[in-house]
Amino acid sequence: MNLDAILAQTMLGLSQGVFYAMLSLGLAIIFGLLNVINFAHGALYMLGAFVALIGYSYIGPWLGYPDFQMGFWWALFVAPLVVGCFGMLMERFMLRRLYQFDHIYGLLLTFGVALVLQGVLSNYFNISGTAYPATPEMLNGIVNLGFMYFPKYRLFAIVLSIIVCFATWFMIERTSLGAVLRAGQENPKLVEAFGINVPRMVTLTFGFGVALAALAGVLAAPIYSVSPLMGADLIITVFAVVVIGGMGSILGAIVTGLTLGLVQGLTQALYPPAANTVIFFIMVIVLLIRPAGLFGKADG
Amino acid sequence: MNKVFWVLLIVLGLAAPWLMYPVFAMKLLCFALFACAFNLLLGYVGLLSFGHAAFFGGAAYITGHVITAWGFAPLPGILTGTLFAMVLGAIFGALAIRRQGIYFAMITLALAQIIFFLALKLPFTGGENGLQGIPRGTLLGVFDLNQPITMYYFVFAIFMAGFLIIYRTIHSPFGQILTAIRENEPRARSLGYNVERFKLIAFTLSATLAGTAGATKSVIFQFASLTDVHWQMSGEVVLMTLLGGMGTLFGPIAGAAAVITLQDELASFGSWVQVAIGGIFVVCVLLFRRGFVGELARMLKAKSS
């Protein structure tokens, strides 16, 4: 095993890690304000990929304009918008009724929603996956990174995801909009007294969190095949990432996601059989030595 | 009211093989025991485990393996599977109770995923195919379990044993402390109870009985497959408990019967089963969080007062 091969696996790990980062970031934002763990996050990621796929290959013929195709660049905007709206409806008409009860009901509700989404799409699409055919011309091919040749598209996905993650971090931690949001996490009643419509803020936040998941889904579509089950196993790994990082910090969620992607990539290089489970074992170790999570506050 | 349920349970339980297919009746009992074991944790301690498939399916694989490869008789086979679930439950429990609430659910889910990957990759598990052709054998060298009726009463005996253990546990001083922890953990702690220890014992007991259900399942159907250890199985047992009424003694049995019947009826509709299950989840959480038996008990109470 030479250094170049290890570096190569590290880059592949990073391209996985950006998905962990985007999904755990969305979960952390939602959890911060709503105290709900969105089990449907994986399904909404999957839905994002399907919006891209359907927009390109199916929607034209369905609507009677066989020539209409929504390209990849459009999908990057449209999918988060569509899925974000879906998420906002979900929050407004379902989750909102449950805030007064135990938090586990939110988890159970979103689990049900995830099953419904998965089940419906499984009826119409191949569960072993459909290739996304619309990767833009300019992102095809490979680029020389010095130590390896890397697919251009994956590099693009890494860079874009990292930009989105840090822009989100900046918005929440450094702008006045974010300050309101953080205040809403601390004390919603008081924020409401200042004349801010907190329920609307909660809805928009939920929408934003799931829009991040949908964006990740669109970015994943050209790399992995688009399948109704693509989010299901991913979300469990992301839950482990969230347990490891703790949901107390936005930056923590991003950093943990990226790091664990790298670790998984390295494991793939050094001891492939453990690659699927290494994150779960790290979770076990973290639970033993620092139960609140690396960036977490003790959670009562 | 409980007396009525007990009589109903025993009469229906004894008559079941003449009322429906014995295999279907056995499946019902298996999942009813699984749901009751799960309810011990969710309903009486307030801990939502999203990883109970690991105990159910893990025990199914171990039982299948010791019967097929090592020639164990059915009863020792089931006991071995149960013992495995107990050890696994103690380990997972010790890890998961270090966090609370929603984290607890995520941790159990992630830990169960390790078992799923092991079931997929370990050499003895048969990978995607699972373990097939597990012989039913003869019970205690006397009763031929290939006879559906004999097998049924064996399963019924296992179910009743498990159910009585749960009943005893809930109605013991130990069970009272569990309920106290569910209602108000800090207060239970301030009264001097070692909350962690009680949670761990309850978790282990719940995992053990879930294991018994899984082990029995692998003998009934003569196979253990990835479905048994998949997270969706963990979700189904949550639904059974929720639908029937968590924290009620008989609710999970009703819930299991409802979910299993539904799956059976919709079996020819492919993934629509999943949609139906998800839909019921949503409706249940939004509209009747007490479940069938819980709502029934509430109505009877309202009438009598």
Image (tube, helix red, strand yellow):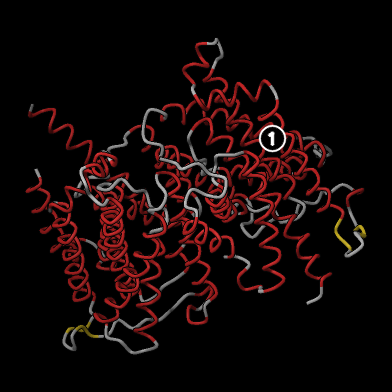
Point out residue A88 in the picture as x, y percentages from the top left corner.
57, 28
Q: Secondary structure at mark 1?
A: helix
Q: In what quadrant of the picture does the C terminus of chain B appear?
A: top left
Residue A71 lies in quadrant: top right
Q: Residues within 10 Å of mark 1 (few under 14, many from 20)?
A: some
Quarter containing the N terminus of chain B: top left
Q: In the visual, does B50 lie left or right of A167?
A: left
Task: Evaluate whether residue B146 shows in this view.
Answer: no
Residue for point 49% across, 16% down? A190
Q: Is residue A176 above or below residue B12?
A: above
Percent of width and height locating residue A111? 47, 44
**Where A29 falls versus A269 (above or below)?**
above
Q: What is the three-letter code of the residue carrying label 1?
A: Trp
Residue drawn where x is 53% and y is 75% of the image: B127
The residue singled out by tag 1 in the image is A169
Q: Position of residue B158 (x, y in %)?
A: 20, 69
Above or below, comparing residue A89 to residue A117 in the picture: above
Q: Position of residue B62 (x, y in %)?
A: 38, 77
| Mark count | 1
Figure quadrant of residue A4? bottom right
Let me know if residue A70 appears in the view: yes
